Amino acid sequence: MALKRSLVPQSVYRRQLAARLKELRDATGLTLTEVADQLEVNQGSLSRIENGERGTTPVLVRALLDLYGVKDEARRADVLDLVRADKEQQKPWWRKYSTVLTPTRYDGYLALEAGATHLASYQPMLVPGLLQTEDYARAVISQMRKDLSPPQVESLVRVRMERQNSRLDGEVPARLWAILDEAVLSRTVGSVDVMRDQMRKLVEASERSNVTLQLLPFSLGAHPGLYGPFVILTFPPPTRDLVWLENPKNSVYLESPEDVENYTDVFDQLRSTAFDPSETHTHIARISKELEE
């Protein structure tokens, strides 16, 4: 299994820019050495730009577009927009929380999630972060991260709430498909009051146009999801899908086609055996009503 470990993976826009520039160079038949010689730039730098390992500037990209014979203004503007978007994504809203995010590579996940169009999440034990209430998130973080001080816990809670505003309620909301094991609903996190509010939020989430919820019932028995939670992130072409596996100190992302296909197959199996969205809504609404009584 190919594991890629990085603190902050390349932005989606950088990946797209890299692919676009390589495609344009290949179309001319020029080698990296020839391009470097003609523009009098370092070949290694050009290689890292085409591999998505580093960003670049509008000045260099304009020179590349001129060399590659790209004269159409719309095509030039599309490529230059990717340069600017990559620079903007290097100044994310979560940077102010870096002291609590960096140790667990959580900022790496946020960088990926920020550019995803679709998120396929499987959670066997907890409500996904994008659907947690503030009190539920606080209870989860404070109990799972005993190494954090109360102010640090509050910082992570704020990150989680800002994530929800950014990805589910932003100008271009992501499409979330979340599959939960029934254990998520049975596990009391925080208190009965916390769970009551959380069930209410799940009911509301299941009614959103950009959120699909499915529940895996206990009656299903053993299933492929018992290996643990994961998130599959889908990006605008040509960026490939990725899988994120979160661990306490060493979270990783997988990007090989074989790994992504494997997790996609597992998600599809879970989706086909889980309650459909309507049944899931009914089940969660019933639990929510019981907690209200």
Image: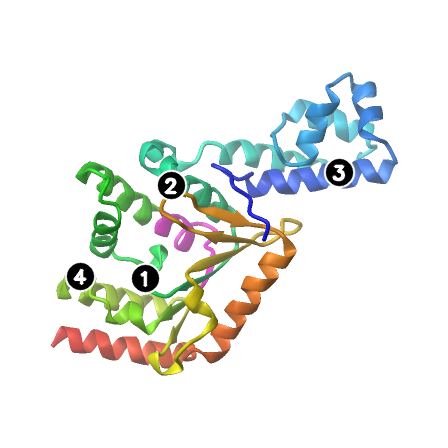
* Helix, strand or loop under label 2: helix
Residue segment shown in magenta: 163-177
Q: How many marks?
A: 4
Gap in Å between the C-alphas at discs 3 and 1?
41 Å
Identify which amino acid the numbered label 2 is placed on: Thr
Find out whether residue 264 is within the magenta segment: no
What residue is at 56 percent from the left and 36 percent from the top? 85
Image quarter (top left, top right, bottom left or bottom right) of the C terminus: bottom left
Q: Which residue is outermost to the right?
A: 29
> Is the residue marked by circle 4 packed among few (<14), some (14-19), or many (20+) residues within 10 Å?
some
Q: What label does residue 104 carry, if any?
A: 2
Kind of residue sitting beneath label 1:
Val
Mark 3: few/some/many CA within 10 Å (<14, 14-19, 20+): some
Q: What is the spatial separation of the Cα atoms under label 2 and label 4, in whole angstroms?
A: 26 Å
Residue 175, percent from left and from top: 48, 60
Residue at 14% in and 66% down: 192
User: Could you tell me which residue is drawn at 52 percent across and 51 percent down?
Assistant: 116
Helix, strand or loop for disc 4:
helix
Depicted 242 relative to depicted 103: above or below: below
Q: Position of residue 287 (x, y in %)?
A: 23, 76
Helix, strand or loop at mark 1: loop
In primary-sequence order, the first of circles 1 and 4 is: 1
Q: Are marks 1 and 2 in contact (CB under 8 Å)?
A: no
The residue wearing badge 3 is 22
Residue bearing the label numbered 1: 127
Task: Name the one closer to the observer, 261 or 293.
Answer: 261
Q: Which numbered dot is residue 194?
A: 4
Q: Position of residue 229 (x, y in %)?
A: 42, 60
Please name the amino acid that badge 4 sits on.
Answer: Val
Q: Is residue 215 visible?
A: yes
Q: Residues within 10 Å of mark 2 (few under 14, many from 20)?
A: some
